[in-house]
Image (cartoon, helix red, strand yellow):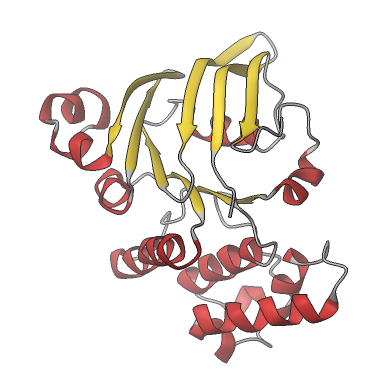
Amino acid sequence: MTGGLVLDGVSAGYGAVQVLHNIDLTVAEGSITAVVGANGAGKTTLLRTITGQLRPSAGSIRIKDGRDLTRVPVEEMVRHGVALVPERRGVITELTVEENLRLGGLWRKDRRAADEVLAQMYELFEPLARRRKAAGHQLSGGERQMLALGRALMAAPENLLLDEPSLGLAPKVSAQILGMLRRLRDDTGLTVLLIEQNVRSALAVADHGVVLNLGRIVASRPAAELAEDTDLRHTYLGF
């Protein structure tokens, strides 16, 4: 894989309201980087900007190999190896598990390759294999999160972005989902950018941690170091 992202001086916002201020961020290839911060820190805006849903007012966004994503339309991101699992998961509840998964691989012209990746998703997410004909609305919260993750992985991304994957899930299910990210990183070299409300869990699974406050990066260190910094946690993360 050739994942990895580099943000250089990125600013963005909504109309006259600037939310992100001069963000410099490197997501190392084959790593998990967790971006944490209080509500309103700009975390979701950061993901929206990287994935082309929101245009930056300044700065650039590049993949490690040098490709510039700054003006790439959102619908073209998948062809550049970038996939997003949005907050609230975005599962199409009227479609079956298998139909949802196949949506993630629609851009593939090789049907055999798509079938092979689908089989891999069923191996990775065994509960989905058992419920492949079930409609999205029949799934539990954890199964829906697995489905959203599997659908994103159907595109064989180099960079996977996740917005609050543990939101609304029981602690045991949340730990299972986050553990899968480490397994994917270890087995495939996938690069992961994780936005997560559960700071302890995010820093436990991540290699690197970034603290965002009012649209500015106030700390960027190995995740284990951030987790041990009592003053920083109390000031910005509330624990």
Q: Residue at x 53, y 35 (%)?
A: 44
Q: Quadrant of residue 40?
A: top left
- On screen, residue 106 versus residue 55, left or right, reads right
Quadrant of the snapshot with the C terminus: top left
* Residue 216 position in % (x across, y down): 43, 17
Q: Determine whether, in the image, residue 94 is placed left or right of residue 120.
A: right
Residue 13 sits in quarter = top right
What is the quadrant of residue 92 in the picture?
bottom right
Using the image, determine if residue 166 lies above or below residue 150. Answer: above
Q: Position of residue 27 (x, y in %)?
A: 47, 37
Above or below residue 115? Residue 190 is above
Q: How many marks can you see?
A: 0
> Among all residues in the image, which is located at the extreme bottom?
130
**Is 210 placed above or below 171 here?**
above
Let me know if residue 156 appears in the view: yes
Residue 202, how many percent across, how many down? 32, 48
Judge by depth and name the residue closer to the eye, 193 or 62: 62
Q: Residue at x 19, y 25 (%)?
A: 232
- Drawn side of residue 87 relative to residue 206, left or right: right
